[in-house]
Amino acid sequence: MKISIVIPNWNGEHLLAKNLPKVISSSPNTEEIIVVDDGSTDGSLQLLRKQFPKVKVISRPVHEGFAGSVNDGVALATGDVVVLLNTDVEPQKGFLEPLLTHFRDPDVFAVGCLEKSLEQGKTVLRGRGLAHWVKGYYIHKRGEVDKMTTAWVSGGSGAFRKKMWDRLGGMDTLFNPFYWEDIDLSYRARKAGWKTLFEPKSVVRHYHEEGKIISIFTPRDIKKIAFRNQFIFIWKNTTDLDILLSHALWTPIRLLQAILRGDIRMLRGYILALQELPQIVVHRFKNSSLYKKRDAQLLEWEE
C-alpha cells in the first residue's frame, strides 16, 4: 500500500520549519510528501526549496482556500492512501501504522487521528465527531475519544482512500475559504455506504492557536462563514423530505431569533449562501448516483 502525505500551506513558513521535519521523521516509508502553497506571500516557498528539496511543491499563484489546495495535492498524489496534515499539526512517532491497518477493509474511506489540541493553555482531545439532525439542522460536536465511530474525519489530520476520494470529486470548493468541507466530504462518503473511522492510537499534536484561521480572521468573520457553510451543507446534501421540510419551517424562526438577539451573523451567512444557490443545485447532483443511504440512516449510532 503506497502512502502520500499532502500538506496545504498559506503563509505558514514558521510552522513548516517547525513541523515538517517531524512529518518527515515520523513517516519514513511514505511514497511522497506534497506541500501545496496557496498563494503565500511569506518565505514559505524559499524555505521549502532550500531546506526540503525532496518535498514536492505545488505553488498556487493566488490564495483561494483550503479545499482547492487539498484537491490539487491529492490530484498529484500517487499513493493508494493520502494522509492530510495541516501545517500546525505535529505527528507523533508511529502515527501512521494504526491508521493504515483499517484500510484492509475495502469499505473504509477515511480514518482520523487523535488530536491533542493545545487550546488556551489546555490539551483538548479531539478527532472523533458526533452529529445529528435537530429541527432541520445538522448539529455537530466533539465526541469522546473512546470509540472508533465518527461522523467525519478531519481534513487536518486524517487518512483517505484515494480512489474513493476521486469518485467523490474531493473536497467541495463551495466551502472555501474554510470550515465544513471535511464534514461534507465524509457525509457524502457515508451516504455512499463507505465508512469513516477514528483511530485513538494515531496521535498528533495540534497547535490550534497557531493556525491561520484564528490568526488572520476575526471571530465575527469566522462565525459568518461557518453559518454560510452550514446552509450550503444542508441545501447540498439533504435528501430526506421530512428533514428538508423541518429546515424550511425552522429557518425563518432561527433567523428571527438571531436578529432579536442582536446577532446578525447568521442572517449574513444565510444571505451569502443564497448567493451560491445556483452552484449548490449543480453540486447537489454530482454525487447523487453514488448514494445508497438516506440521511436518517446515518444516525443509528450517533444518537
Image (cartoon, rainbow, N blue to C red):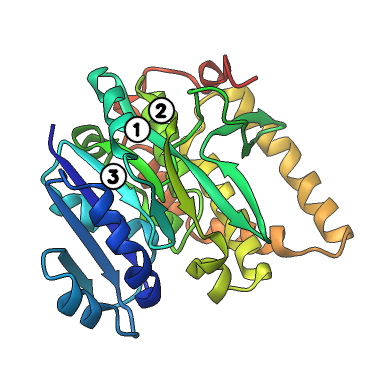
Count numbered badges in the picture: 3
Residue toward you, 94 or 285:
94
Tell me if residue 69 can be seen: no
Residue 209, disc: none
Tell me if residue 86 can be seen: yes
What residue appears at the point 37 percent right and 68 percent down from the top-left corner?
A: 18
Cβ atoms under marks 1 and 2 closer than 8 Å: yes
Residue 83, disc: 3
SS at mark 3 in the image: strand
Q: Tell me which numbered mark, 3 or 1, is placed earlier along the sequence.
A: 3
Q: Residue furthest right?
A: 260
Residue toward you, 237 or 303:
303
The quarter holding residue 244 reads top right
Vertical placement of 205 versus 208: above or below? above
Percent coordinates x, y for residue 193 in the rendering: 36, 19
Residue type of the residue flagged with mark 2: Thr
What residue appears at the point 27 percent right and 17 percent down from the top-left corner?
A: 105
Say left or right for 173 vs 254: left
What residue appears at the point 36 percent right and 63 percent down from the top-left corner?
A: 19
Label 2 sits on residue: 196
Percent coordinates x, y for residue 118 in the rendering: 59, 56
Disc 3 crowd rating (10 Å Cα; few below 14, some 14-19, many 20+) is many
Label 1 sits on residue: 110
Percent coordinates x, y for residue 278 in the rendering: 43, 53
